[in-house]
């Protein structure tokens, strides 16, 4: 477990300080805004899909290290996934953070967030980008509050 915790700290720090997927997809086919009023995180997620497959994902905005790292890694793992696969992965990731779920069912890059479940207030930070992209893919471009 300590290896996973070390990897978590390393990945969150790296992706929070140096996000690879910050920006805007232009043109985009879907856009969503997210806001976590408990901590002030705000972000915009833009997505380009082609025949139900995600071709590109970017996020922009302000958030804590967990929110930023989660958004960045989410964008990384969703490229090439269908909308249906994205929704399944969201459910799996959310379960990892809220239940005593097995980390084998999510990509290792996302499994590092399993420790967040020990801090219930931080679950909202880790899932904000996910709720926002699901809302955007469902055609709800308005603010998503998680």
Image (spheres, helix red, strand yellow):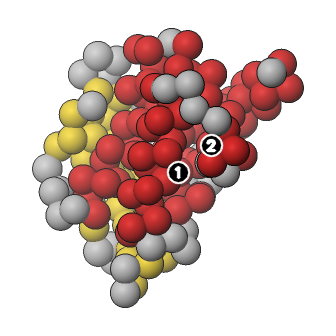
Q: Nearer the viewer, residue 41 or 94?
A: 94
Residue at 39% over, 84% down: 50
> Does residue 52 appear to the left or right of 2 in the view shown?
left
> Does residue 83 appear to the left or right of 4 in the view shown?
left
Q: Disc count in the image? A: 2
Pointers 1 and 2 in contact (CB under 8 A)?
Answer: yes
Quadrant the C terminus occupies: top left
Spatial separation of the CA atoms under disc 1 and disc 2: 8 Å
Q: Give above or below for 133 relative to 80.
A: above
Quadrant the N terminus occupies: top right
Q: Which mark is residue 103?
A: none
Residue at 37% over, 37% down: 128
Residue at 21% over, 41% down: 144
Q: Give above or below for 127 relative to 87.
A: above
Mark yes or no: residue 34 visible: yes
> What element does badge 2 sit on?
helix
> Does residue 4 appear to the left or right of 109 in the view shown?
right
Mark yes or no: residue 16 visible: no
Residue 4 image offset from top left, x and y in percent: 78, 28
The residue at which mark 1 appears reads as: 74
Residue situated furthest right in the rendering:
3
Residue 142 image offset from top left, x and y in percent: 14, 50
Q: Earlier in the sequence, mark 1 or mark 2?
A: 1
The residue at which mark 2 appears reads as: 110
């Amino acid at each position: 477990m300590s290896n996973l915790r070390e990897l978590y700290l390393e990945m969150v720090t790296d992706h929070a300080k140096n996000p690879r997927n910050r920006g805007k997809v232009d043109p985009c086919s879907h856009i969503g805004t997210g806001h976590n009023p408990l901590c002030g995180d705000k972000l915009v997620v833009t997505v380009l899909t082609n025949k139900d497959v995600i071709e590109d994902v970017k996020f922009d905005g302000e958030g804590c290290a967990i929110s930023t790292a989660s958004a960045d890694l989410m964008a990384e793992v969703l490229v090439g996934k269908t909308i249906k696969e994205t929704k399944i992965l969201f459910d799996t990731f959310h379960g990892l953070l809220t239940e005593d779920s097995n980390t084998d069912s999510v990509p290792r890059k996302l499994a590092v967030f399993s420790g967040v479940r020990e801090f219930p207030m931080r679950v909202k930070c880790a899932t904000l980008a996910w709720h926002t992209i699901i809302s955007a893919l469902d055609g709800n471009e308005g603010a998503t509050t998680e």
